Image: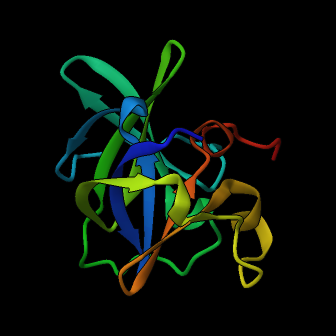
Amino acid sequence: MKANEQYCTFSLAGLHFGIPVEQVQEVIRPQDMTPVPLAPSVISGLINLRGQIVTAMDLRRRLGLPARPADKPPMNIVVRNDDSALSFLVDAIGDVIEVTAETFEEPPDTLTGEARELILGAHKLDGRLLLVLDTARTMALQPA
């Protein structure tokens, strides 16, 4: 891990997450989605991003968190992995923050299930934990 690293932060079900900024293409407001029949349950649909069709993945479902309230539309964080893009649906977008390696720790023992496999670790910040999401593993879907 680098000495200082910048993360695009977001929240899901009251938890704070971060993705390295170099993996984020853009952050956009809620979008109209086209459902995809027979898609895995974590796929909410497809969005049209200036002519590019991008798959939208619900991170609450991917991490095994409770469903998002129906009256709260999700925000989109479009991430890139090699030559593909995927939109992560999140509750709210935070700031870009810079953290040091000294604040990083392995995933907390309280983290269980699918989330434990997708979290690289956590940075201890003032009054909260910033959970670092493994973008590549999160983007990879397991066979249904």
Position of residue 122 measured from the top left corner of the image (x, y, whole percent): 57, 66
Left or right? Give the position of 118 relative to 16.
right
Q: How is the image coloured?
A: rainbow
Res. 34 image quadrant: top left
Kindly identify the residue that appears in the image at 25 percent across and 66 percent down.
73
Residue 70 visible to an observer of this rendering: yes
Position of residue 8 measured from the top left corner of the image (x, y, whole percent): 33, 49
In which quadrant will I find the N terminus? top right
Above or below: residue 112 compared with residue 25: below
Left or right? Give the position of 118 relative to 42.
right
Kindly identify the residue that appears in the image at 62 percent across and 56 percent down.
41
In this view, the residue farthest toward the right is: 143
Kindly identify the residue that appears in the image at 62 percent across and 46 percent down.
138
In this view, the residue farthest toward the top is: 83
Residue 13 visible to an observer of this rendering: no
* Front-lying residue, 67 or 5: 5
Res. 143 image quadrant: top right
* Front-lying residue, 97 or 27: 97
Kindly identify the residue that appears in the image at 21 percent across and 53 percent down.
30
Q: Total of numbered circles in the picture?
A: 0
Above or below: residue 47 compared with residue 66: above
Position of residue 12 measured from the top left corner of the image (x, y, whole percent): 42, 72
Position of residue 87 measured from the top left corner of the image (x, y, whole percent): 40, 40
Res. 141 image quadrant: top right
